[in-house]
Image (cartoon, rainbow, N blue to C red):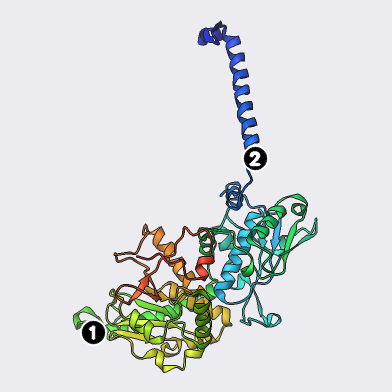
Amino acid sequence: MDLSSNCKPSRLFGCHLTSVTCKCLALVTIALFFRVILLHSFSANSAIEWNNLDFILSRSLLLNSDGGIRGDKFLEAPQIVWGLNNQKIAFARACLTARMLNRTLLMPSLSASLFYKEIDRLQPISFDKVFQFDRFNSLCNGFVRLGRYSDLKNQSGIYDLQKGSGRKWTVERDLEQLKRSSGGSADKYEVIRIVGKNPFLWHDHWPVKDYARVFECLALVDEIAKEADKVVSKIRQVGRKLRSKTEPVENKFDAEGSSLPPAPYVAVHMRVEIDWMIHCKKLELRSGISQICSSKQEIMERVGKIVSFESPTVVYLAVADSLLNDSSILGHWKKGLLPFEKKKLGVDGIYKKHPYLIQSAIDYEVCSRADIFVGNSFSTFSSLVVLERTQKMIRMGTTSSCGIDVRWPSYAYNIPDESNGPQKWMTNMSDTSLKAISYGSNVISC
């Protein structure tokens, strides 16, 4: 092939050049151009200090969906304690910490029992006894990763990372510690073991959407999911029977109402037990916010103002066991709203077979699957239920519940709307920290 015929003489820097010279000068020019760009970038970067967000975002870019999480470096977290949803937050925080360090999180122990002060009496339960291990890794592939202790090769020992405590241990100091541990001498160890605080008490460096991504990967093991199925099925069965009594005869085949569509139900996370009321009253005094506590009567009245109810409708009350013998929570509801808690529903035997953590997981599922959910925006349980329901709505293309009828609607009974009904509630997924979830400010108002 005649190269000279395919590259006509060019005019560069004011000179006519042959084809070969043209190519050589072009290559030199390109090399000089990129050298200038690289030198400029290097000098600019050396003059700019990364802030916290820049560091986290850079980590996110490095860890792509092709499996960027290292499988030969691990993070070990202390046993996760307290209530179900505090444990879910703690677990997600441990996952996101491991992600920041580009490490696999060793499968942690959860706590089946609930002892706030007697840590030594907490009954440990393996993560994979509650949630599906393989499904978690499949759903969260490339984002975070769980490993088993059997994956360890024990080739380079363990590096103990002591979490600081007290007021002087600020968010900035905590993040700086993690930055140092993501490289340097600590990174050569196979395992970084975090010593000290429960992960729920670790400082928060991640946006709500990152937590939501981890929560979406949590699927209950079949045994627990089937228990939740039984409770939901019982609620809908009761609803069908009640509605069959008001349906015209030609619209049903038998007295059981088997031809009727699944009966919708409302789930209310009713926080009125004594220890909660003491806690929320103190929180109101400390924060200067008056819309935290709600009485039984206020909850009943506000739930009754939700206009989308069809009569009759079963209202499932997710309440503490201490309220199961309190008949006052079953009275004074608006006509057409028929309240049931697990004892009246006849499913308390399902709950009694399991420790506290599993009971909470079943109730969480019942509430998250409800056609309408009503909770307290200062409750972690309610807030995580609404976060999950918000995710479902967003995936269906709904970004606001204001002024329209939507699927998976949620309400906050502690915040009255203009008609003194419960405020419509969606999680603000753009929040830069999960802190808002715990303090009731993560409510998108209409």
Amino acid at dot 1: Thr
Q: Within 10 Å of the Cα at label 2, are there few (<14), some (14-19), or many (20+) other Cα atoms?
A: few
Closer-to-camera residue (298/66): 298
Q: Please indicate, yes or no, whether residue 2 appears anywhere in the rendered image.
A: no
Position of residue 287 relative to residue 168, above or below, is below
Residue 438 vs residue 46: left or right?
left
Nearest the camera: 351 or 413?
Answer: 413
Rendered image quadrant of residue 177: bottom right
Q: Which residue is mark 1?
A: 246
Q: Residue at x 40, y 92 (%)?
A: 328
Mark nearer the viewer, 2 or 1:
2
Residue 104 coordinates in the image, percent (x, y): 66, 58
Q: Which residue carries the number 2 mark?
A: 47
Identity of the residue drawn at 76% across and 54% down: 186
Residue 421, x across and y down, in percent: 33, 76
| Amino acid beneath label 2 | Ala
Contact, mark 2 vs mark 1 (Cβ under 8 Å)? no
- Disc 1 is placed on an element classified as loop
Asked whether the viewer can see residue 151, the reply is yes
- The C terminus lies in which quarter of the figure? bottom left
Identify the disc placed on residue 74. Answer: none
Residue 375, how many percent across, how many down? 43, 76
Quarter of the picture containing the N terminus is top right
Residue at x 49% of width, y 69% of height: 384
The span from disc 2 to disc 1 (Cα, nearest Å) is 75 Å
